[in-house]
Amino acid sequence: MKITAKGQVTIPVDIRRKMKLLPDTEVDFAISGKQVVLRKSPGRRRRGSRVVSTMRGRATKKMSTDQIMALTRGK
């Protein structure tokens, strides 16, 4: 694996999956002896929380849970 002219490197898919490195995941680099360590940034909200907070308040109609269930499941 090589570093590009822009200083970029591709993280192999098996490592991304194992470490749950999704798009937009914030990461930190640290130096440990002669090694560079990549890790998820601490304290960042999880992706699900970010998605929910982004969608909160965007509904245009007020519906009860029963009304939503009737729409999605049919009557």
Image (tube, rainbow, N blue to C red):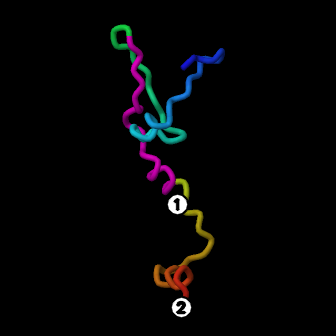
**Placement of 20 over or under 10, stated as above or below:** below
Determine the residue located farthest toward the right in the rendered image.
5
For the magenta stretch, what is the residue range? Answer: 35-53
- Which callout, 2 or 1, points to the residue nearer the camera? 2
Task: Give the x, y percent position of residue 18.
Answer: 39, 39
Tell which of 51 and 12 is nearer to you: 12
As helix, strand or loop, the secondary structure at mark 2 comes to: loop
> Residue visible at 62% across and 71% down?
60
52 within the magenta span: yes
Residue at label 1? 56
Task: Give the x, y percent position of residue 11.
Answer: 51, 29
**Placement of 73 over or under 6, stated as above or below:** below
Task: Give the x, y percent position of residue 73.
Answer: 52, 83
Residue type of the residue flagged with mark 2: Lys
> Residue visible at 41% across and 32% down?
41
Residue at label 2? 75
Q: Earlier in the sequence, mark 2 or mark 1?
A: 1
